[in-house]
Image (cartoon, rainbow, N blue to C red):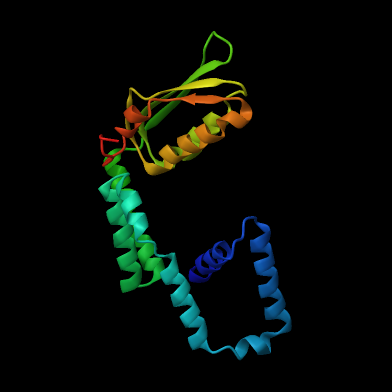
């Protein structure tokens, strides 16, 4: 588990941008494991451990805690608790702790969400109504609904019955809004009203 995460982080830090980087990474590992196992055995374990620790430290971004706090103090505390649990135990146990805390917080918010896409009588106009709590578990259903929006459509987002929205769903909506112009679409939403559904977001913004 550690190796997969560190290899992915190393690829990203090296400037990789496509899936070919992962394929090439696996190919090099296969070549060394199949043809040069004696050379790999000469590598000191202490060096491998040092690389692993160094890369892991670089993956910890404390500034991310401040960003996550904008989406709710609970999210930031889960991030901190997961980091501490990983350091105190191991990666698998730490991730399980973070996952359990996230599920507990999610249960408090109740993840029921109704997604309704309504085509208006006027051509080129539609509305997307979200009712309930939009959490990361509902990202796939929201994404599938957004994919059904026809090109050249002005989409009105209705959130008057939306009780809560988390970072994942909010970022999905923002990303779709940024890319909507490429399909001739437009996302119309009251961002101030939507941000009020995010726990911990300051109303002054």
Judge by depth and name the residue closer to the eye, 190 or 87. Answer: 190
Q: Looking at the rendering, which quadrant does residue 201 occupy?
A: top left
Above or below: residue 59 compared with residue 138? below
Which quarter of the rendering shows the C terminus? Answer: top left
The residue at the point 44 percent across, 65 percent down is: 59
Residue 144 rendering spot, x and y as whole percentages: 54, 33
Left or right of 85: which side holds 19? right
Residue 126 rendering spot, x and y as whole percentages: 51, 17
Judge by depth and name the residue closer to the eye, 112 or 134. Answer: 134
How many numbered marks, from 0 up?
0
Residue 39 rendering spot, x and y as whole percentages: 66, 88
Is residue 42 visible to us here? Answer: yes
Q: Looking at the rendering, which quadrant does residue 185 occupy?
A: top right
Left or right of 172: which side holds 164? left
Above or below: residue 70 compared with residue 83? above
Q: Looking at the rendering, which quadrant does residue 194 occupy?
A: top left
Is residue 99 visible to us here? Answer: no
Which residue is farthest right?
35
The residue at the point 74 percent across, 82 percent down is: 35
Judge by depth and name the residue closer to the eye, 96 or 159. Answer: 159
Above or below: residue 156 compared with residue 68? above
The residue at the point 33 percent across, 22 percent down is: 160
The residue at the point 38 percent across, 25 percent down is: 190
Above or below: residue 38 compared with residue 103? below
Which residue is farthest top?
121
Residue 120 rendering spot, x and y as whole percentages: 52, 12
């Amino acid at each position: 588990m550690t190796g997969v995460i560190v290899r992915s982080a190393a690829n990203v830090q090296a400037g990789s941008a496509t899936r070919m980087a992962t394929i090439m990474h696996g190919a090099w590992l296969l070549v060394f494991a199949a043809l040069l196992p004696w050379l790999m055995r000469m590598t000191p374990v202490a060096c491998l451990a040092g690389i692993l620790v160094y890369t892991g430290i670089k993956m910890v971004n404390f500034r991310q805690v401040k960003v996550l706090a904008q989406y709710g103090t609970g999210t930031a505390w889960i991030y901190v608790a997961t980091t501490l649990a990983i350091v105190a135990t191991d990666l698998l146990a730490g991730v399980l702790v973070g996952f359990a805390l996230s599920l507990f917080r999610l249960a408090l918010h109740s993840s029921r969400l109704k997604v309704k896409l309504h085509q208006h009588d006027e051509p080129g106009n539609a509305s997307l109504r979200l009712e309930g709590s939009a959490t990361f578990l509902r990202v796939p259903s929201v994404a599938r609904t957004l994919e059904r929006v026809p090109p050249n459509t002005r989409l009105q987002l209705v959130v008057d019955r939306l009780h809560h929205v988390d970072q994942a769903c909010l970022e999905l909506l923002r990303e779709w809004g940024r890319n909507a112009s490429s399909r001739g679409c437009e996302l119309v939403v009251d961002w101030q009203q939507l941000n009020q559904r995010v726990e911990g977001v300051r109303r002054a913004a």
